[in-house]
């Protein structure tokens, strides 16, 4: 078997879709469809509930949840849904909002507590709850009306796993409206289905319940990035050392670890093409030839790639946000597409990135 190696920037179409910090912008990927990458502000404008709409009991329960309301139907905790949305809005991202007490939620909560000078409790308590309400209060679930743009494809319900088959496609768009809407509102597809039982998400004009994840403005300029391998997080700091943003991440693996040391941001590729080279990267299945995988949110590096000065390494999105910090990567740093997209709009060429063990 050919040797495995790290995913690297050589299979990212930097020449086709690279936006360099400092303003230099290259042409879009040739022959590619319109970019399915997330926009600079990935949260869409929200339609106001109609005056005659009937409020959902589920929406009322979650929007009024108390810190002690940790048990709910289908394993979804009203308090955790509320806390996850509030954390997301203040840039302490829990990753996928799913209403479950997982490590990504706990680590986001810990960073928030540390930043606010609160005792780190590894869970919700009255003090952190009060702080979140004061900083990010307001409804966490809202009614949203699906638009034509939300439900239009093309969708790719049967995306193959084999790279050879993927290379035959013109794009790697969303599998279905559920995946697209989940990404729009930073939600897991299971939670989306739980909040909207039996609802047809493919029909424009349909009213659904979604997380209100419009993030607050970031006050400060990103100066440095720390990739924390132990906590599986990416943290962005300002000049004074204050945390501006934090995101959960999958950071390498035991077989193909991420590097140690300090590097710099080289550039950003939006809607990148993935170039597979078995002689330089890993061998996938029976694919022994170089392949060009098309862009899209289900591309192996998701909707955006942040290249580093260390060859073969970068920070990027993922086609499967629900698996962030639950599986391994090939040396690079994976985040949800919406988190990677936000970070990409904050970085500039030359920003220092430190890998911390």
Image (cartoon, rainbow, N blue to C red):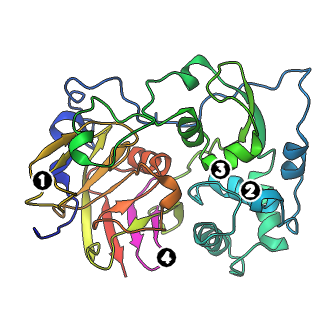
Q: Residue 190 carries which label?
A: 3
Q: What residue lies at 24% left-to-right and 32% top-to-bottom?
A: 25
Q: Is residue 320 magenta?
A: no
Question: Element at badge 4?
Answer: loop
User: Label 3, label 4: how many angstroms apart (C-alpha)?
Assistant: 25 Å
SS of the residue under disc 2:
helix
Distance of label 2 from label 4 (alpha carbons): 21 Å
Question: Mark 2 against mark 1, which lies toward the viewer?
Answer: 1
Give the mark nearest the N terminus, 2 or 4.
2
Residue positioned 38% across, 40% down in the render:
159
Of badges 4 and 1, the one in the foreground is 1
Q: Which of marks 2 and 1 is nearer the N terminus?
A: 2
- 220 up-or-down from 113: above or below: above
Q: Where's residue 35, x and y in %?
A: 36, 29
- Which is more toward the observer, 45 or 99? 99
* Segment tinted magenta in the rendering: 221-237
Q: Distance between the residues labelled 4 and 1?
A: 31 Å
Q: In this view, does 53 lie to the left or right of 152?
A: right
Q: Quadrant of the C terminus?
A: bottom left
Q: Residue 277 — which label?
A: 1
Which numbered disc covers residue 231? 4
């Amino acid at each position: 078997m050919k040797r495995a190696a790290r995913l690297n920037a050589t299979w990212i179409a930097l020449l086709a879709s690279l936006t360099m910090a400092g303003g230099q912008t290259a042409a879009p990927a040739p022959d590619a469809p319109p970019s399915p990458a997330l926009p600079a502000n990935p949260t869409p404008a929200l339609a106001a509930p109609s005056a005659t709409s009937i409020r959902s009991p589920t929406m009322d329960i979650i929007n009024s949840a108390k810190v002690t309301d940790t048990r709910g139907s289908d394993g979804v905790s009203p308090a955790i849904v509320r806390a996850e949305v509030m954390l997301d809005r203040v840039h302490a991202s829990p990753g996928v909002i799913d209403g479950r007490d997982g490590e990504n939620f706990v680590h986001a909560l810990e960073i928030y507590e540390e930043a606010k000078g609160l005792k780190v409790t590894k869970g919700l308590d009255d003090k952190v709850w009060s702080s979140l309400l004061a900083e990010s209060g307001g409804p966490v679930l809202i009614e949203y009306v699906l638009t034509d743009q939300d439900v239009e494809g093309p969708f790719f319900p049967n995306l193959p796993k084999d790279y050879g088959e993927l290379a035959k496609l013109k794009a790697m768009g969303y599998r279905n409206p559920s995946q697209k809407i989940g990404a729009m509102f930073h939600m897991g597809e299971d939670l989306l289905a739980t909040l909207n039982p039996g609802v047809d998400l493919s029909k424009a004009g349909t009213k659904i319940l979604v997380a209100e994840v419009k993030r607050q403005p970031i006050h400060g300029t990103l100066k440095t990035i720390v990739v924390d391998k132990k906590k599986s997080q990416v943290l962005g700091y300002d000049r004074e050392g204050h945390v501006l943003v934090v995101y959960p991440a999958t950071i390498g693996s035991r077989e193909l670890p991420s590097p140690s040391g300090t590097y710099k941001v080289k550039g950003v590729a939006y809607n990148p093409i993935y170039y597979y080279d078995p002689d330089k990267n890993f061998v996938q299945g029976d694919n022994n030839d170089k392949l060009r995988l098309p862009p899209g949110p289900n591309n192996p590096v998701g909707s955006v790639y942040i290249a580093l000065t260390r060859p073969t390494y970068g920070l990027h999105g993922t086609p499967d946000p629900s698996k962030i910090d639950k599986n391994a990567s090939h040396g690079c740093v994976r985040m949800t597409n919406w988190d990677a997209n936000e970070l990409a709009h904050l970085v500039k060429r030359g920003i220092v990135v430190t890998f911390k063990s």
